[in-house]
Image (cartoon, grey):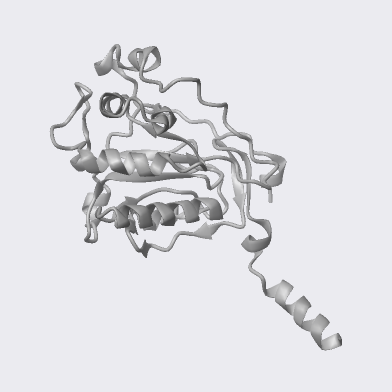
Amino acid sequence: MLTTALLLATSTFLTPPRALQSEAIGGYAAGCLRGSMALPLEGPGYQVIRSKRLRYYGHPDLIHYLQGLASRTKMAGMPDLYIADLAMARGGPFSSGHRSHQTGLDADIWFRMADKPIARWEQDAPKEWALIDEPSYRVLPGRFGPQQLELLRLAAKQPEVNRIFINPALKAEVCKRAPDEPWVAKLRPWVGHFSHFHVRLRCPVGNPDCQPQAPIPPGNGCGAELASWLKDKPQLPRVSTSYRAPTLPSRCEG
């Protein structure tokens, strides 16, 4: 009996902390992450880029989602995904680049895909692979094809996905090609995102201090809402460079 009890105690002690207490805390733009998991830098159907930033951590739900998405795209005969920023090991705000990505439930995925490692200079020059001409906000010829549409479909259809942020011009392209598909509603227009899209998962079950985002409005978002984004295409604002550090929940301290 004593031996059994000792083994149980030892087993519990050796259990990785994230298996017991993985938790997204606070909001997507003002929160932190406990018990994070690192996304392996390479895996079936994907490659992590810009790994020197150390932003390849996430809630286990996000890691499983990304690996599942890569598996589905690989089965569909598509090239490897390039996955960029997730979160830092403990979540929280980045020093640059994003206001969200703080709870381990956000991830950036490039529209570009390839079955070979990407050169470091290319990783830091995303404009080389932009789908949008910035001055006109027109989609560049040949940059948004059937593969990119299918990638969005596979990414958005999963029930754990809360929404996906994409450039307004790309949302308009999707509205032309797949207006009646339910997942289109999850695609939310946002500034920037010239070469990638941003997946955001729902708050995980059993994470009571995770603050959910407001529900998506009814409809597919292809009407007046999108028109308001596209009305003055050349004047669409860039992501603001001014940034104030958010006030984090007390549980994120220490």
Q: Is residue 16 left or right of residue 111?
A: right
Give the percent coordinates (x, y) of residue 219: 45, 20
Residue 204 in which image quadrant: top right
Q: Residue at x 32, y 52 (%)?
A: 73
Give the percent coordinates (x, y) of residue 95: 47, 43
Give the percent coordinates (x, y) of residue 197: 35, 38
Q: Is residue 107 left or right of residue 112?
A: right
Q: Is residue 211 left or right of residue 8?
A: left
Q: Is residue 214 left or right of residue 176?
A: right
Whether residue 97 is visible, yes or no, is: no
**Which one is nearer the viewer's eye here, 225 or 99?**
225
Q: Residue at x 68, y 48 (%)?
A: 206
**Which one is nearer the viewer's eye here, 187 or 129?**
187
* Residue projecting furthest to the right: 1
Whether residue 104 is visible, yes or no, is: yes
* Residue projecting furthest to the front: 180
* Residue projecting furthest to the left: 141
Residue 44 in which image quadrant: bottom left
Total of numbered circles in the picture?
0
26 shown above or below 77: above
Q: Residue at x 71, y 45 (%)?
A: 251
Residue 41 in which image quadrant: bottom left
Image quadrant for the N terminus? bottom right
Give the percent coordinates (x, y) of residue 147: 24, 43
**Which one is nearer the viewer's eye here, 113 or 99?**
113
